[in-house]
Amino acid sequence: MEKVRPAPPAWQDRESCMEQVAQMFAMRGKEKPLALVHTYGCQQNVADSEKIKGQLREMGFAFTEEEEQADLILLNTCAVRENAEFRVFGNVGSLKALKEKKPSLLIAVCGCMMEQEHIAEKIRKSYPYVGLVFGTHVIHLLPQLLWQALSSRKRVFLRGYGEEGQDIVEGLPVERDRDVRAWLTIMVGCNNFCSYCIVPHVRGRERSRTPQAVEEEFRELLRLGYKEIVLLGQNVNSYGKTLDPPLGFPELLRRLDRMEGDYRLRFMTSHPKDATHELLDVMAQGRHICHSLHLPFQAGSDRVLREMNRGYTRRQYLDLIAYAKRQMPDMTFTSDVIVGFPGETYEEFQETLAVVREVEFASLFTFLYSPREGTPAARMPDPVPQQEKSRWFQELLRVQEEASQRVGQALVGTVQRVLVEEYSEKRGLLVGKTEGNLPCDFAGDLSHIGAFVPVRITQSYKGALRGEIERNPM
Ligand code: SAH
Ligand code: SF4
Ligand code: F3S
């Protein structure tokens, strides 16, 4: 597909594009046009959508959940597995009728899927009512893109940018979804090229924000009253490698942990090949860093790990976990696992189960392998039938369920510091998370929302906890 470069001068003038977009809607009698943003996929996309919404808000948009009311519907898509893509195509398809009823509606599709040539081509050919398509590297050009899409009769496609060496654009406005927890992107992209994974192909090479930019945003989040800040990156442990001078992730964590305030700090995702003892030591010594670690291992067999290009062995992974447990006996672990990687045998899958049994993860994100066009694994022989893989998958779920049950049960009777996020009408209870990131609900009044509350755990069900406020905390 031909690349459209943001060359014409009017393209580059962000301010005037913003004004013109607002004026165009005002002329249609819409002082406050309404936007609906659907987000698929991981926290990176959630963070991107917050920047998209921030820019829309600056242009005068308000937000709605009702498709019928929206003047702009934007889908921020995920390409990580086939079923994520099916869902997006299903949803784009279902918008056709709405567009016919309301021709002024602008339908836009962005995100990771749009960075794949064949997918963007499919949108171009089969979904002619989609007026704007853009990729993951040009979110900051949203005002210009919207202006083009609204002012010309042509469809606008802008994708495939910024692969090498593109700086991270700072200073975009952010419309945050939550008021207790905030996402803070510290790096974008990925250099690992795990053989099954599309992310490096759609997100480009690893780039880190400067520690100054990260610290500034962190301070601002504390000032705004956020109580939990989650540092984001595809592989946070390789943070800072591209900076001059380089600065390691443990040092960044140390600096953030020194800030004054009553807050919690988490991060994701850690890659086992780059997670070091130094990182775990910083966690153990930290005042604000939660003792919870998301450390995806993907598979238990060394042969499969090699084929996946993961860069560690099962032993190295387990040693890291053992060191973490020694430093922080209260640590909770979570992980990602892929079942049925091409050529994985049942015996090799049993090694995955053995890791699950040994570590005792609080919870697992489990995925059936899904071939992604353009990745090396998609060309590997894959003889095991889908039905067989599904049986293995069920076996994994059963083993994990027992582990979650044991992890939760071990906390019954203890007092946990819970950060309260919201009130659940359905349960009639407050809902929050422990330091270990386990969900916990208990009875209490609404004034606790956004506060840390000591809760004595009375029950556990598959890793979800129930408790009551501890009146005499030690
Ligand atoms: N950067 C993170 C995770 C990114 S994607 C990391 O390296 O851990 C989230 C998870 O999706 C991965 O950990 C992996 O378990 C899963 N995943 C990625 N590609 C997949 C594929 N083709 N099929 C099935 N699961 C996949
Ligand atoms: Fe994908 Fe591997 Fe990068 Fe994670 S580390 S995003 S699994 S390539
Ligand atoms: Fe999906 Fe893109 Fe995240 S492919 S998992 S939304 S980085």
Image (cartoon, rainbow, N blue to C red):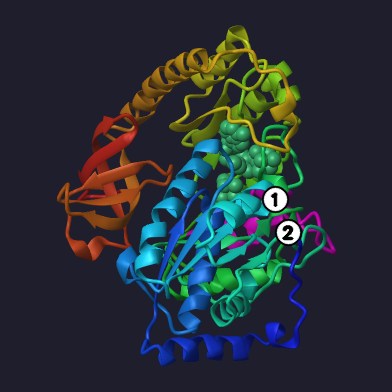
Horizontally, residue 262 falls left or right of residue 9, namely: left
- Which of label 1 and label 2 is nearer to you? 1
The answer to whether residue 237 shows anywhere in this view is no
Considering depth in this image, is 454 or 23 the residue closer to the camera?
A: 23
Residue highlighted by disc 2:
160
Rendered view: 436 above or below 267: above
| Residue 30, quarter of picture | bottom left
Amino acid type, label 1: Glu
Q: Position of residue 222 (x, y in %)?
A: 48, 70
Q: In this view, does 7 lie to the left or right of 123?
A: right
**Residue at the image point whose x is 73% and y is 17% from the top:** 303
Q: What stretch is highlighted in magenta?
A: 229-257
Q: Would residue 61 be counted in the magenta stretch?
A: no
| Residue 155 coordinates in the image, percent (x, y) | 60, 69
SS state under label 2: loop
Mark 1 and mark 2 lie on one chain; the one further toward the N terminus is 1
Asked whether disc 1 touches disc 2, contact meaning CB atoms under 8 Å apart, the reply is: yes
Against 328, is 316 above or below? above
